[in-house]
Image: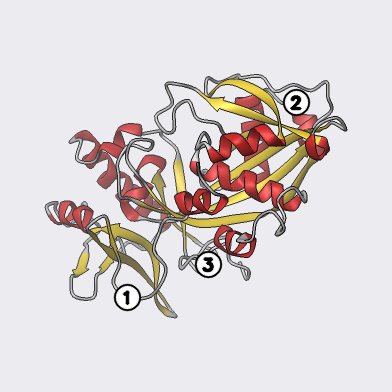
Amino acid sequence: MKSNLDLVNDTDGFPYGDGPITINGQVLFTLLWRDAGGEYPIGYVLDRVVDEFAKLPEQLTGHMQVDRTARTLRMFQALATEPARTAAVAALTQHLRERDVFPLLRGWRGEPWPVHGRRGELLFSVERAAVGLLGAVRYGVHLTAYVEDAAAPHGLRVWVPRRAADKSTFPGMLDNTVAGGLMTGEDPFECVVREADEEASLPEAVVRAGTTPVGIITYIYVTDGPNNGEAGFVYPEVEWAYDLRLPADVVPQPKDGEVDEFYLCDVDTIKRDLAAGEYKTNCGVVMLDFFIRHGILTVEEEPQLAEIQKRMRRELPFPGPHWGNW
């Protein structure tokens, strides 16, 4: 059985501390970017990815520069515009996909995801399935829809979906009511509205009127392989969290095949399923955050609450809209 801190460890699995970093025996390189203020990091790249990049013509790798002593990497710096950089990244990732170099690219989605600079600019976009090659920040949204029920423990029940059995990642596991990734240029709230319709058939008017933003959750996830295609890749992630109190007569329904079924669960059932490891990793953390905010999980029950809360909002070393001065 998993403790609440175990659930956080499963999601925020990247080591803390300074110095050289090794993940599952793989040395990490820091992907650097330069602007007028100097260099700063935008991603973590595995050494085996660097080795594959090094086999390719420099035109494909954006005239890559590697410092194996300092464990740093520079790519696409010579291209002056975002469209040119995006096109170059697309050419590189498509080349790798066609040759089946990395299994994670078999999950190709045709969705551009953003990589940001520290001044608020879009540096380039990269195919969703290929973000892990660069270890850049991924952005998503999670909506927890609940129904007030005086007869239920803590006075509420939560709509919990089971992911489709044929999903490429975390098949058959429990999830948050609605969740999805942010494409380049997409507003988080508009992403919630879109995903709520696509995944749960929730009426747009209900979502727009009743959804409340409740903050962001940040962590650095390391893939384990069986549930996410290929082990050892590093994903710094930012999730915008939202709550939606639904009327009793509004019932989520599967629509796009992402979900097999929705269950209206009481708190005790959710706690049991969390402890049993039934939830997709980051969805378990979002649920813990919901419990904390609604006074369901308290320090009296969970003596490690402060550590859990700290780990849910890890400081990420890379720029993006999660930065307070963004």
Mark toward the start of the polypeptide (2 vs 3): 2
Q: Which residue is mark 2?
A: 203
Give the image quarter of residue 265: top right
Identity of the amino acid at label 3?
Glu
Q: Is residue 149 above or below residue 31?
A: above
All told, the count of numbered labels is 3
Disc 2 versus disc 3: nearer the observer: 3
What secondary structure is found at the residue carrying circle 1? loop
> Which of the pair 257/295 is nearer the observer?
295
Disc 1 versus disc 2: nearer the observer: 1
Crowd class of label 3 (few under 14; some 14 to 19; many from 20; radius 10 Å): some
Q: Which residue is mark 3?
A: 315
Q: Residue at x 28, y 44 (%)?
A: 93
Q: In the image, residue 46 lies at what x, y percent? A: 26, 57
What secondary structure is found at the residue carrying circle 2? loop
The residue furthest right is: 150
Q: Residue at x 57, y 34 (%)?
A: 273
Mark toward the start of the polypeptide (3 vs 1): 1
Crowd class of label 2 (few under 14; some 14 to 19; many from 20; radius 10 Å): few
Q: Which residue is mark 1?
A: 19
95 to the left or right of 80: left
What secondary structure is found at the residue carrying circle 3? loop
Q: In the image, residue 270 lies at what x, y percent? A: 64, 35
> Which of the pair 115/27 is nearer the observer?
27
Crowd class of label 1 (few under 14; some 14 to 19; many from 20; radius 10 Å): few
Q: Are marks 2 and 3 in contact (CB under 8 Å)?
A: no
Q: Is residue 280 above or below residue 11?
A: above
The alpha-carbon separation of the residues under discs 3 and 1 comes to 17 Å
